[in-house]
Image (spheres, rainbow, N blue to C red):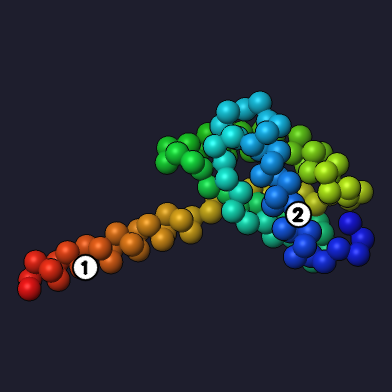
């Protein structure tokens, strides 16, 4: 990991973690998880992984599955990016997509009301 910029390490981790979740996990709940962003602290002690779920009602199950397989994911990721010291993994649900959909619905409802008044 020495000599690699932080942004490049984040990008590499995102790609490899997505591949691990899609191809190498046995838990079906993890196969429906999409990694949207990875952020690593400057001292390489924590890696925050933002994710969304393919289906709307799977948020809690995916969170539990990710926490349960945290050790496996950390070990696999360390092997793939050839890291001697692997940051602690922190999983956070990415609410940006839901927020964007909510804003889109609000804008659409305003347009409908505007069209009805005209």
Q: Nearer the viewer, residue 2 or 67?
A: 2
Q: Could you tell whether 28 is left or right of 45 in the image?
A: left
Q: Is residue 58 above or below residue 37?
A: above
Question: Picture coordinates of residue 20 (x, y %)?
Answer: 71, 38
| Disc 2: which residue | 12
Q: In the rendering, which numbered label is found on residue 110? A: 1
Quarter of the image where one finds residue 68: top right
Q: Nearer the viewer, residue 104 or 48?
A: 104
Image quarter (top left, top right, bottom left or bottom right) of the N terminus = bottom right
Please report the residue visible at 59 percent of the width from the left and 53 percent of the height from the top. 36
Please report the residue visible at 35 percent of the width from the left and 63 percent of the height from the top. 103
Q: Could you tell whether 80 is left or right of 68 in the image?
A: right
Of badges 1 and 2, nearer the viewer stands 2
Please report the residue visible at 42 percent of the width from the left and 54 percent of the height from the top. 98
Kindly report the distance in space between the C-alpha atoms of the residues bearing marks 1 and 2: 41 Å
Q: Is residue 116 above or below residue 34?
A: below
């Amino acid at each position: 990991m020495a000599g690699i910029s932080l942004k490049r390490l984040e990008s590499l981790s995102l790609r490899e973690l997505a591949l691990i979740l899609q191809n190498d996990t046995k838990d079906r709940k993890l196969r429906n998880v999409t990694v949207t962003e990875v952020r690593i602290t400057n001292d390489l002690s924590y890696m925050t992984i933002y994710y969304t779920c393919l289906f709307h009602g799977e948020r809690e199950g995916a969170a539990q599955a990710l926490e349960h397989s945290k050790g496996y994911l950390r070990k696999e990721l360390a092997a793939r990016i050839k890291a001697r010291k692997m940051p602690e993994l922190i999983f956070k649900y990415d609410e940006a997509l839901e927020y964007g959909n909510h804003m889109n619905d609000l804008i659409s409802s305003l347009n409908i009301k505007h069209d009805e008044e005209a």
